[in-house]
Image (cartoon, rainbow, N blue to C red):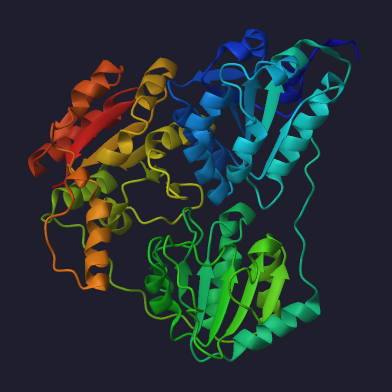
Amino acid sequence: MPARPGKAAIFEQFAADGITHMFGNPGTVEQGFLDESSAADGLSYVLALHEGVAVGMADGYARAAQRPGLVQLHSGVGLGNGIGMLYQAKRGGSPLVVLVGEAGVRYDAMDGQMAADLVAMAEPVTKYATRVVDSASTLRVLRRAIKIAMTPPRGPVVVVLPADVMDELTSEPAVATSVPDTRSRPDPGALDEAAGLLRDARSPLILMGDGIAVSGAQRELTAVAERLGAPVWGVNSSEVNFDTTHPLYGGLTGHMFGADSARVVADADAVLIVGTYVFPEVFPELESPFAPGARIVHIDLDAYEIAKNFPVDVGLVADPRLALAGLVEALGPGPRRVPPAPARHAATGGGTLMETFARVLAERSPEDLTVFDEALTASGPLARYLPPRQPGRFFQTRGGSLGVGIPGALGVKLAHPLRPVIAFTGDGGSMYTFQALWTAAREGIDAKFVICNNGRYRLLDLNIEQYWREQGIAPHAAPAAFDLTRPAIGFTALSAALGVPARRVDRSEQVEDAIRDMWAHKGPYLIDLVVE
């Protein structure tokens, strides 16, 4: 292979791996390889006005495409701006490859402007972080990064690229990255043991997470649930891991208070945990929430998560799809213990403005609509009228970082350009990354956005009310810091200023026209929906 600068060779590597998008915000120390990017065939640079937007777009892209999301960040300040979204990607298992520019190895001793230990900065919010210090290993390190990001448990990887190393020559060949196949099936004896613990349970329960979606194990999970007659609850579940209209679907355990999860599992005498860690709340229970004597089986590809906090009876480090298929066989024939389907929510008029909007949207949208939901306190109506059923058609925020809704939907749309995509976010959450609309306009990304505008950080209202109850504090006015109405944010004007047409909806009679105009518009479009 002829020698060429590392800054040119990296784009050969991306081409070899079929990477088509780089999401980023440029800086001076990356100018060498960004200059080369203009000559890279098949790679589009998607410019974001903030690093959090770049990471959020890459996160949505990686989740929807099931491929690496490539990000470019600028030195210490750019990495710092992206850390919140990187934390979300780590918690959610998104396979991101993040290139962070640096002035150069030769400047290490100078303590110059923007200098920082970038690897140390990145390590707490990544699966792996490294630095290229020898041009002859540039592509080797990139392939290692892609492999680590894509190997379950997936996660973000940071590679620091010093400018002087990128200017040096390398003769490494660019070849496709080898990603190992981890689809292992447990030993038959271990499956028999697990089946024996679950088969005769009086009150079995299943806790599932996004490892189901990554593995493509939705059908196998359904078969196990129906064989056991076990309710299925989502734990770290932000994609379609189980049809939410199935009569065995229980709901989500929650992400804030461990007491909520404890109530869900309290009466179960056997629990199957698959494709998730337990439990992901901000305030988890310190003592085991499982009933005394409850038998616990945990299946996951991440050995670290099995029995991390509470003992299990059988732990299987295995691919969820193959393990669940083997569990069906081990359980043997038996009746499908499925309760009658619950009555569906009638699609009638009335209710709140959010209810009306969700109902009309369900009636007026294409069947293959893909939803990105960050508006958690407004999610109830969406779940009733647009229940997540089909894998790859629903994504929800995860990891606790606000602002992923708008950029996440852009990434999903870029991964699947022919699908109709709509994002729901809150007025507070949207302002973390509202400038992502400029990228939507610049790139002509035909995604739609709904701001669920209640003038508050509503989730904080709900959380503090629970805090008052737990502490025996009499209800009173919430902190002024939760209020977003002084002054009120002009979302339609702000959206228009960023190049995206928008309209405000504050009455139910406006909903039909707004949704019709939204779908008729070719390109990004925003609705400011006043929900309270």
Left or right of residue 339: residue 335: right
473 to the left or right of 231: left
Quarter residue 436 falls in: top left
Name the residue at 59% across, 58% down: 211
Q: In front: 457, or 40?
A: 457
Q: Is residue 305 above or below residue 8?
A: below
Position above or below: 250 against 443: below
Q: How many marks?
A: 0
In the rendered view, does 297 fall on the left or right side of 417? right
Identify the residue at horizontal 28%, vertical 57% (top origin). 380
Residue 442 at x, y percent in the picture: 41, 15
Q: In x, y percent, where is residue 443?
A: 44, 18
Q: Is residue 243 above or below residue 484?
A: below
Q: Residue at x 75, y 30 (%)?
A: 142
The quadrant of the rendering that contains the N terminus is top right
Q: Is residue 109 visible?
A: yes
Q: Quadrant of residue 114?
A: top right
Which is more toward the observer, 525 or 466? 466
